[in-house]
Image: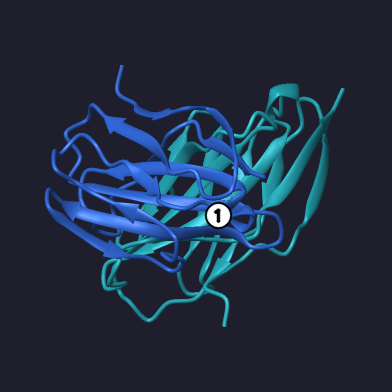
Chain colours: A blue, B cyan
Amino acid sequence: EAQVTQNPRYLITVTGKKLTVTCSQNMNHEYMSWYRQDPGLGLRQIYYSMNVEVTDKGDVPEGYKVSRKEKRNFPLILESPSPNQTSLYFCASSLTGGGYSPLHFGNGTRLTVT
Amino acid sequence: AQKITQTQPGMFVQEKEAVTLDCTYDTSDPSYGLFWYKQPSSGEMIFLIYQGSYDQQNATEGRYSLNFQKARKSANLVISASQLGDSAMYFCAMREDQGGSEKLVFGKGTKLTVNP
């Protein structure tokens, strides 16, 4: 089944404890991206990747890192999480980066930082 | 200025009836895509339907259709024969070819409630 898989689905952690949210897609998509969704602020892009070894900042990259060593994987790293990073995170992928390519989302990761 | 505007924070519809969710957009890019996503209370983001700016015909996908009026810059979602499972948040989104990050820009969403 074609899908974007994120793990974990739920995560509760403490301030400063490094964590990684994994994302994998099996559709051979070139483009991958991370979003966060917050009440009143909607969905905002954190980072994106046009292809392997190519990543760039989105609208809210502070406090996050990403890497794209393989086409299928695009992990999101929080080196020192803070409470303001409590949010619902989505990984998404599309065949290409163009306007005609639908983004397919993972099921989301609910992160709580205490 | 907002790129995607959804003016209906909430909508109610009776089961089996049709409902239209409004979406207007703003872009100067001649090449773009318009998308609708459904987000149920469980949180996942489900892709429903897509319309390209050069598409001559309105997109349809099962009970979903997109009423695309390019001159008005509107892309309304029509759900026919509503079902209880259609109750969810619905987001209109746009992706421009010249956006730089090729990101999807979302509207604020419309919460649809289907009544039995």
Q: Nearer the viewer, residue B45 or B86?
A: B45
Residue at (59% x, 61% y) in the render: B107
Relative side of A8 to A40, left or right? left
Provide the residue designation for mark 1.
Answer: B92
Residue B87, given in percent of the width and then of the height, sits at 73, 32
Badge 1 local density, few (<14 within 10 Å), some, or many (20+)?
Answer: many
Relative side of A35 to B6, left or right? left
- In the picture, the quarter occupied by the N terminus of chain A is top left
The answer, for residue B25, to whether it is visible in the render is: yes
Residue at (77% x, 56% y) in the render: B9
The answer, for residue B55, to whether it is visible in the render is: no
Residue B106, given in percent of the width and then of the height, sits at 53, 59
As drawn, the residue found furthest toward the top would be A1
Residue at (40% x, 50% y) in the render: A34
Q: Nearer the viewer, residue A28 or B65?
A: A28
Residue B22, given in percent of the width and then of the height, sits at 65, 58
As drawn, the residue found furthest toward the right would be B116
Chain to which the residue tagged by mark 1 belongs:
B
Q: For the residue labelled by badge 1, is the local secondary structure a helix, a strand or a loop?
A: strand
Residue B70, given in percent of the width and then of the height, sits at 45, 68
Q: Vertical placement of A44 versus B73: above or below?
A: above
Relative side of B47 to A3, left or right? right
Q: Nearer the viewer, residue B90 or A112?
A: A112
- In the picture, the quarter occupied by the C terminus of chain A is top right
Residue A91 sits in quarter: top left
The amino acid type of the residue labelled 1 equals Cys
